[in-house]
Image (cartoon, helix red, strand yellow):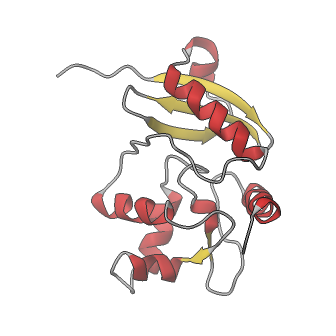
């Protein structure tokens, strides 16, 4: 089996540095902060350049949907949750319970929260759009300030609510 080459690029976004990792088939991860290995030896690819372009458009309020292929690694359950997250419309939030119901397991709110926590491709797979049942913001890999920034960005640029 041939080993897949991983490409990396660091994008200085409005929420700080984002390290983008991609293989030939798609985006594998977006990490908050600079990955030192990528910073020193990373090589960009067509896929990472596309990710930077789409993220720039997103942060400018011009992009409401991402067209990049994502190939995150996770369990079948996590992948079902992440797929459900991609169906949350731009500028809209859902609760963990609503996602659990959507994937067919109304009692899995906590497991949905854990899958959100493990999402390797934040922003593109919009786990920031998931909030607590009481309407409060809950944990986010980039911090609650980043989550709030992303939700406000989407609300300000949303055509309709």
* Above or below, 62 relative to 37: below
Name the spot of residue 105 as percent of width and height, x first.
Answer: 34, 82
* Above or below, 3 relative to 79: above
Residue at 67% across / 30% down in the picture?
Answer: 34
Kindly indicate the quadrant of the structure image that contains residue 147: bottom right
The residue most toward the front is 159
Name the spot of residue 38 as percent of width and height, x first.
Answer: 58, 21
Relative to 11, 44 lies left or right: left
* Above or below, 86 relative to 21: below
Which quadrant would the N terminus be assigned to in this image?
Answer: top left
Residue at 46% across / 79% down in the picture?
Answer: 109
Relative to 112, 33 lies left or right: right
Name the spot of residue 30 as percent of width and height, x first.
Answer: 56, 40
Residue at 65% across / 71% down in the picture?
Answer: 92
Kindly indicate the quadrant of the structure image that contains residue 48: top right
Relative to 45, 58 lies left or right: right
* Above or below, 62 relative to 85: above
Q: Nearer the viewer, residue 136 or 103?
A: 103
Q: Nearer the viewer, residue 34 or 7?
A: 7
Name the spot of residue 158 as percent of width and height, x first.
Answer: 75, 64
Instruction: Count the labels in the image.
Output: 0
Which quadrant would the C terminus be assigned to in this image?
Answer: bottom right
Residue at 55% across / 67% down in the picture?
Answer: 88
Kindly indicate the quadrant of the structure image that contains residue 131: bottom right
């Amino acid at each position: 089996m041939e080993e897949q080459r991983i490409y990396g690029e660091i994008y200085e976004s409005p929420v700080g540095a984002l390290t983008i990792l991609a293989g030939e088939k798609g985006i594998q991860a977006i990490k908050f902060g600079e990955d030192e290995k990528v910073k020193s030896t990373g090589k960009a690819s067509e896929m990472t350049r596309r990710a930077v372009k789409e993220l720039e458009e997103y942060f400018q309020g011009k992009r409401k949907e991402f067209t990049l292929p994502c190939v995150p690694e996770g369990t079948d359950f996590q992948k079902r949750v992440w797929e459900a997250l991609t169906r949350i419309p731009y500028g809209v939030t859902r609760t963990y319970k609503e996602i659990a119901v959507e994937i067919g397991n109304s009692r899995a709110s906590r497991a949905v929260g854990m899958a959100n926590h493990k999402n390797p491709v934040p922003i593109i797979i919009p786990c920031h759009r998931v909030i607590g049942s009481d309407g409060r913001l809950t944990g986010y890999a980039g911090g609650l300030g980043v989550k709030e920034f992303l939700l406000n960005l989407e609300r300000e640029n949303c055509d309709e609510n």
